[in-house]
Image: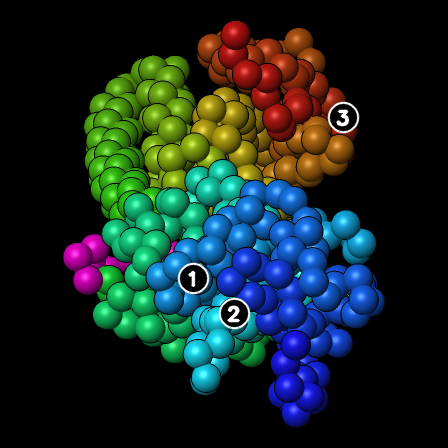
Amino acid sequence: MLPVEYQEFLEALSDGLVVVDSSLKVRFANRAFLDICALTEDRAGGRDIGDIIGGGRSATDLRRGLEDLIANDSIVGPVEVEMQFPTVGRRVLRVVARKIRPSGGDAPIVLVTFQDVTAVADLRRENERQQRLLQGIVDTVREPVLVLDGRLVVIAASRSFYRTFRVTEADTRGRLLHELGDGQWDIPVLRDLLENVVPARTAVEDFEVEHPFPGLGRRIMLLNARTIYREGNNSKTFLLAIEDITERRRLEEERAAATRRVELLLEELNHRVMNSLSIISSVIGIEGRAMTDEAARAAFDRISGRVMAVATLYKTLSVAKSVDSVDAPAFLGGICHDVVHALQRESAALRLTVEIDPFAMSSSVAISAGLVLNELLTNAIKYAFRGRQHGEVTVAARLSDGQLSLSVTDNGSGIDADARVDSGIGGRLIELFSRQLGGETVRTSGSTGTQARLTFPLAQPSPK
C-alpha cells in the first residue's frame, strides 16, 4: 500500500488513477477510477488490472503495453482505448502510464491514469460520420460546392471544386475562404454576400461574380448560397454552389454577335429589295403613262401598285429591323399612303381616314393582307366617286378575339354588284389572297356608299 499522504494526494485528482505492481496487481485505486468502473475499493484492491478493465482487443493491447512498460521503462500513452467493463459496459478512456522506482530499493510500480472521454469520443465519431456523409453528398454534385462554417472556414468541398479551380484538399479544408490559394477567393463582394446578405436572406440565387484566378484567367461565376441551421445548434453553416458560366457567356456573346451580323445582312437585303421594287414600280409607271390605250394604262397602274405594296412591306421590315413580323399600323398605313400618292389625279379631292388597331402581324400574313388592301383601296379611289368632286374613304383594321377585320369604306354612290370595276384580275387576286388567309372578303354597296371587308384569323396555322 502507498503511504497515507500519497493516497490523500492521489484522491484529489479528477482523473482516475491506479497504482499497479510489476505483476500488474492493483495496489491502489483512487475514487475517480472507482467511479469510472463503478467499483468499490474492496473489489478493486489486489486484483489483476486485466480483470478490472475487462476483455476486448483494447484491454489486451493495454495490458501488453503495461507489461512492456515494466520490462523496458517505456511510457504508455496518451492513448485512447475503448473498453468493455464488466460493471458499466463500454467506456472510451484516454490512458497514460509511467513506471516509478521508489527510493530504498523497493520494487517498481506503475501509475496509470484514466480519463473518461466517452462522450467526447462519441461526439467526435458522430461528427466524423456526418462529415463523411456530408462529403459524400457534396461529391455527388456536379458543380463546385463549398461548405463553410460561420467563420467562413471550409468544412468540405466537392471534387468538382478541386478539379475546376485546380487546388488540393490539403490546401482547402480547414482554411478560411479568403485565404485559399494565393488569396484568389478574397473577393470583397463574395465576403459581403456571405457575411451580410446570406444570413439576412437565408438564401441568395444566381449572384454573378467576375474575378481573375491565377492559371485560369478571368472567370464569370453564378453563386448560389444558403444558410443552414441545425435544430438545437446555434451555429450556422453556409452552402456555396459555384457555377462557372465563363464559356456560356462567351458562346452567348458570339451568338449575339452572329445574330447581329445576320440582322444587318437582312436589313441590307430588305433595303435593297425595297429599292429594287420601288425602281420596278417606277419603271412600270413610266411605261404605263406612255400607253395611249386607257385600259392598258390602268393595268400598268395596278401592277405598279401591287409591286409597291410588297415594297412597303420590306420598307416596314427595314425600319423595324425585323424579318418575321411587322407593325400593322406602320405597314397598312404605308400602303394607304402609297396608293393615294400613286393615284394623285383621282385622289385630289379625297379625304382618307385610317383607323388601325396596334398589333403585329407576320410577314407572310402581311403580304397577302397588304395586297388585298391595295386592291380594295385602289378600287374605291378610282371608281367610287365618278362624276363627283369630293369623297371620303375610311380604312379600318380591328382585332377582336384573334380575328382581324380589314375594311375599306367609301361614301360614293354605290356600284352594281354585277358591274366590273376593274380588269377582273384584281377581283381574282382578292379572292385568292382571302382564301390563302383562311378568310373571306365581302362587299356591300348601296346609295350611301360601298364597304369591302376582309375577315380572317390573325394567327395562321403552321404549314404541314
Callout 3: helix, strand or loop?
A: strand
Height in image: 122 above or below 132?
Answer: below
Residue annotated with mark 1: 69
**Residue, x 37% and y 66% (percent of image)?**
73
Residue annotated with mark 2: 110
Foreground disc of the pair 2, 3: 2
- Quote the CA–CA distance across marks 1 and 2: 8 Å
Do tag 2 and tag 3 residues touch (Cβ < 8 Å)? no
* Residue 161 image point, x, y percent: 37, 50
Q: Which mark is residue 446?
A: 3
Height in image: 339 above or below 85?
Answer: above
* Residue 90 image point, x, y percent: 72, 52
- Quote the CA–CA distance across marks 3 and 1: 127 Å
Task: Answer whether residue 216 is magenta in the image.
Answer: yes
Height in image: 418 above or below 231?
Answer: above
**Residue, x 24% and y 62% (percent of image)?**
213
Type of the residue with mark 1: Leu
**Residue, x 52% and y 7% (percent of image)?**
464
Task: Answer whether residue 298 is magenta in the image.
Answer: no
Do tag 1 and tag 2 residues touch (Cβ < 8 Å)? yes
